[in-house]
Amino acid sequence: MPDILVLYYSRGGSVARLARQIARGIGEVDGMQARLRTVPPVAPVTEVASPPEPDDGAPYVDKQDLRECAGLLLGSPTRFGNMAAPMKHFIDGLGSEWASGTLVGKPAAVFTSTATMHGGQESTLLTMMVPLLHHGCVIAGIPYTEPALTSTRSGGTPYGASHVAGQQDQPEPTDEEALLARALGKRIAQLALRLQA
């Protein structure tokens, strides 16, 4: 059964929870399943490297996951309108995958979380798409045929799934944010099936 790779970095848990909602949406498509993976944190040179596997949550991504996936969803919290350093560090190390075309023709989408409503969600989602375009991915967002996209009062954009954690850092997505995340996962899984046919 083909896997859709849901690759994310999460520090406070919000992006990880969105990733699980996306995985639920992928699971709604017959013949598709989600493969949840995360990237290790980055640290100054003076700190000890992370263990080979995280203590909890999804396993760390391996480049084999990219080769084996039928589609990709990339998630990161927002850092000044851009993806977090651990995700950028991982992507920056994919030169050989770019050269060999590992991701060419695979459907891809992005997701994020911010502390505030205007904390850079859309710029983060758009800038996360740029390396995916360089890798030859087929980029998809959330169409306005999803009713929750026009009724949400927090996260959710046509550029990808999103969550507003708020000042209290609430990691759990709202009902509408979760619905839009599942819709995005389902959309990428359906596109992957069509592209494989």
Image: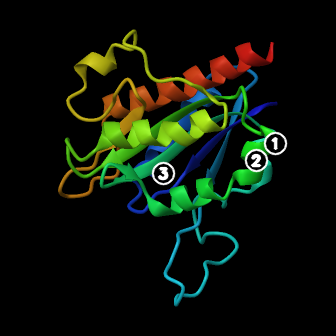
Q: CA distance from mark 3 to mark 2?
A: 25 Å
Q: Look at the image and tell me in which quarter the C terminus lies.
A: top right
Tags 2 and 1 touching, CB below 8 Å: yes
**In the image, residue 79 lies at what x, y percent?**
34, 56
SS for tag 3? helix
Q: Residue at x 35, y 33 (%)?
A: 177
User: Marks 2 and 1, Cα distance to the nearest angstrom?
Assistant: 5 Å
Amino acid on which the number 1 mark rests in the picture: Ser
Residue 187 left/right relative to 17: right
Circle nearer the N terminus (3, 2)? 3
Look at 66% across and 38% down and name the residue there. 135
Q: Residues within 10 Å of mark 2 (few under 14, many from 20)?
A: some
Q: Is residue 34 visible?
A: yes
Q: Nearer the viewer, residue 97 or 118?
A: 97
Q: Is residue 168 above or below residue 7?
A: below
Give the residue at mark 2.
97
Per the image, the residue denoted by label 1 is: 100
**CA distance separating discs 1 and 3:** 30 Å
* Circle 3 residues within 10 Å: few <14, some 14–19, many ≥20: many
Task: Identify the residue shown where x is 20% and y is 29%.
Answer: 153
Which element is circle 2 on? helix
Mark 3, mark 2: which one is toward the viewer?
Answer: 2
In the image, which disc is placed on residue 16? 3
Which quadrant is the N terminus positioned in? top right
- Disc 3 marks a residue whose amino acid type is Ala
| Element under disc 1 | helix
Q: Is residue 85 above or below residue 91?
A: below
| Percent position of residue 116, x then y | 20, 48
Tell me how many marks there are: 3
Sequence-first tag of 1 and 3: 3
User: Mark 2 is on which residue type?
Assistant: Glu
Residue 78: x and y, percent?
A: 35, 51
